[in-house]
Image (cartoon, helix red, strand yellow):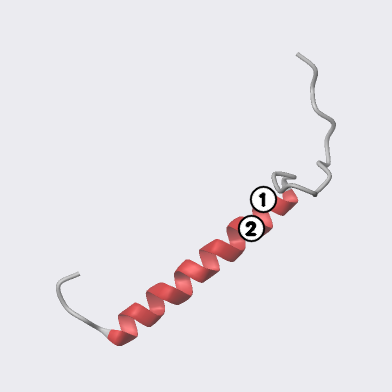
Amino acid sequence: MSHKDPELDRQIAELREEVRVLRAQDALASGRVAGHKPTTPPVDG
């Protein structure tokens, strides 16, 4: 970014944090986080 806009930087930081939180919630919901029991049993191949 060639110019400094504190308001734009703040908005970007807020959106990045929101994306981080949503990704963490999604990971928990789908059982991809260590220590969280998956909702479906693993499939033996």
Q: Is residue 1 left or right of residue 38?
A: left
Q: Looking at the image, which residue is at 80% across and 17% down?
A: 44
The picture places residue 10, in percent across and down from the top left corner, at: 39, 81
Residue sitting farthest toward the bottom: 6
Question: Label 1's element?
Answer: helix
- Percent x, y of residue 26: 66, 53
Q: Is residue 4 left or right of residue 30?
A: left
Image disc number at residue 24: 2
Q: CA distance from mark 1 to mark 2?
A: 5 Å
In the visual, does 36 lie left or right of 32?
right
Say few, some or many: other residues with alpha carbon within 10 Å of mark 2 (under 14 / 14 to 19 / 20 or more): some
Which residue is painted at 85% across and 31% down in the image?
Answer: 41
Residue 3 is situated, as x and y percent measured from the top left of the image, at 16, 78
Q: Quadrant of residue 43?
A: top right
Q: Which residue is mark 1?
A: 27
The outermost residue toward the left is 2
- Above or below, 13 against 34 in this view is below
Q: Amino acid at mark 1?
A: Ala
Task: Indicate which disc residue 35 carries.
Answer: none
Asked whether disc 1 touches disc 2, contact meaning CB atoms under 8 Å apart, the reply is: yes
